[in-house]
Image: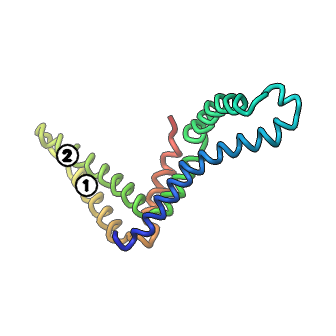
Amino acid sequence: MKQRIGFRGWFYFRTGWSTYFVFILAAINTLTVTYFLAVDNYPILKAIFPTFEQYALIMISVGIPLLIVVGYFHFKKTFAYKSELDVFAESNPYLSRNTVNADLSLKLNLKLISLLLKMSTGEKIDKNEIDEIGKLHRDILKFTDERNFKNNLDIDFLKKEISKSHYIDE
């Protein structure tokens, strides 16, 4: 971790710069440029926005709710955010590995819980159920033995699971 302190610092710097500092400067710059190059030079617009302060206040009061709606649509109503996450998962092997591990653990745990529930109520576990858990065990072992951070097995697994769900939306 110490050998990567420079890259970690660079990441934090870029995040602070692009998320906070540049955002504020861009908003101020946009308001200033649009007012003094557009509004100030057109009498019709100057009548609507007589001062920079009024212009900024009106633009902020309209812009913030508008941008909230745009952000909502970005995350909830379009495939844009889902596509971003696909790219992020494809480029981040740790995220892919954790997601795949969670999915495999969930499948295995659900199967084991169903067997435990049967055993706790005194029901007999039939050969098919034992074969199913054995197959699941072998499949997981084979998968975990073959995958590494350089091949695409985790990504392939995720793509297969995603295609099964067809992006189930709320």
The residue that appears at 45% across and 52% down in the rendered structure is 161
| Outermost residue toward the top in this view | 48
Judging depth in this view, the residue of 3 and 26 nearest the camera is: 26
Callouts 1 and 2 close, C-beta under 8 Å: yes
Label 2 crowd bin: few (<14), some (14–19), many (20+), radius 10 Å = some
Judging depth in this view, the residue of 138 and 62 nearest the camera is: 62
Q: Pinpoint residue 99: horizontal percent, then vertical percent.
A: 39, 55
Disc 1 marks which amino acid? Answer: Ile
The reply, left or right, for residue 82 in relation to residue 51 is: left
Compared with residue 11, is residue 2 higher up or lower down, i.e. above or below?
Answer: below
Compared with residue 51, is residue 149 higher up or lower down, i.e. above or below?
Answer: below
Label 1 crowd bin: few (<14), some (14–19), many (20+), radius 10 Å = some
CA separation in Å, label 1 and label 2: 9 Å
Q: Pinpoint residue 83: horizontal percent, then vertical percent.
A: 57, 51
The reply, left or right, for residue 24 in relation to residue 117 is: right
The residue that appears at 36% across and 71% down in the rendered structure is 146
According to the picture, the residue beneath numbered tag 1 turns out to be: 133
Judging depth in this view, the residue of 132 and 15 nearest the camera is: 15
Judging depth in this view, the residue of 125 and 139 nearest the camera is: 139
Disc 2 marks which amino acid? Answer: Leu
According to the picture, the residue beneath numbered tag 2 turns out to be: 115
Q: Secondary structure at mark 1?
A: helix
Image quarter (top left, top right, bottom left or bottom right) of the N terminus: bottom left
Q: Secondary structure at mark 2?
A: helix
